[in-house]
Image (cartoon, helix red, strand yellow):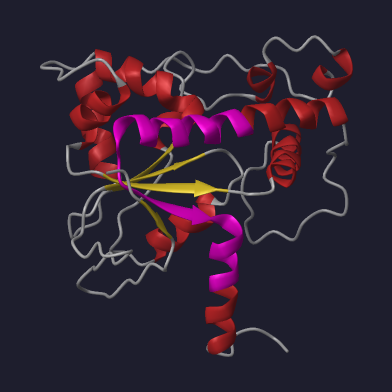
Amino acid sequence: MLQSHQFDFLQISAPNFAFIVSGMSEPRPYLVCASQRSGSTLLVESLRATTVAGNPEEFFQYLPSTNRSPQPRQWFEGVTDETVLALLAPLEPGTADTRTAEQWRDQLLSLGRTPNGVWGGKLMWNQVPLVLDRAAGLTDRSGDDLRSALDDILGRDLAFIHVYRRDVVAQAVSMWRAVQTQVWRDDATPPAPHDGAEYHAGGIAHLVRILRDQDAQWRNWFEAEGLDHIDIGFDDFVARILAELARHETLPA
C-alpha cells in the first residue's frame, strides 16, 4: 500500500551516514522530486553540506540541444502577451550536448555520489521528458515509462522525497522574479535594492498554473506507481531548521 511519510527530520551522523526518516535507516540513493521554487534547494544543500549524503544536483535540467536549463522564454511558450515577453531575456543558442546516453549516465552517477557511496539528485516534473529521452538511448532497457527510466539510470533501490510548497502563489512570485533576473539562488552577495524584476499578474498566473500542475503530476505518479515516499513541506522544513538553530542559540535575539 502506498505510504506518504510526513517529514520528521533528517538526522545525519558522520562519518557513518544514517538516513533516518520515518523508519528508513539504511543509506540508499535518493531522488528529490519537486517543482521550481518549492524549497528543494534548501533541502539538497543541507544534505550536501553533511559531505556524506550525496551531491544532489539538478542533473536532469539541461536540454541536450543547448546544454542549458530552460531559459526564461521557454517557460512561456504559447504566451503571446508582449507585456510579459518584453520582461524576459531573449533565447541564447547554447551548444549541443554530444555525450552518449551511457556517458551521460556514468557522469551523473559519479557526480552525485559522495565517497561513502551515497547518491543524491533532484528532478522537477517538467524535466521528465528529458529523463525519458536520455534513457531511450541506453541499451538493455527495462521499459519505456518513467519508473523504468529511473531504474535504468539510477538503480532499483531508489528512495523518493517529495518537496512541496503550500503557498503556490508565493512560489510563483519567487519564480517570476527568478526568470526575469536569471538569479535562481542566493549567494554571499548582498541583494541589490532593485533587481530589475517587475510585477506582472499575467506572468505570475501563468507560473501558478505550471507549478500546481507539476505538484499534481508528482502526487498522481506516486499514487499510480504505488510508491512509498517522504513528503516534506517547505514551511515545516524551515520551521524545524529555525527551531533547531534557536535551540543551539545561533539566532540573534
Can you say whether 27 is above or below 33 in the image?
A: below
Report how many numbered discs are placed on residues in the image.
Answer: 0
Does residue 104 appear in the picture of this structure? no
**Which residue is at the far front?**
1
Read off the magenta span.
212-240
The answer to whether 12 is drawn above or below residue 176 in the figure is: below
Residue 205, how many percent across, how many down? 78, 29
Q: Quadrant of residue 83?
A: top right
Q: Position of residue 112 (x, y in %)?
A: 30, 46
Q: In the picture, which quadrant includes the C terminus? A: bottom right
Relative vertical location of residue 11 with respect to residue 29 in this rendering, above or below: below
Give left or right: position of 132 versus 39.
left
**Left or right: residue 13 compared with residue 86:** left
Residue 137 at x, y percent in the picture: 24, 13
Q: In the visual, does 73 lie left or right of 43? A: right
- The residue under the point 23% across, 30% down is 153
Residue 21 belongs to magenta span: no
Q: Residue at x 74, y 25 (%)?
A: 206
Answer above or below: position of 236 versus 77.
below
Residue at 39%, 61% in the rendered image: 47
Q: Is residue 235 magenta?
A: yes
Q: Where is residue 249 drawn, in percent x and y?
A: 58, 90
Q: Residue at x 41, y 44 (%)?
A: 57
Residue 95 visible at all: yes
Q: Which secondary structure class fits the magenta region best? A: helix
Q: Residue furthest left?
A: 140
Q: Quadrant of the N terminus?
A: top left
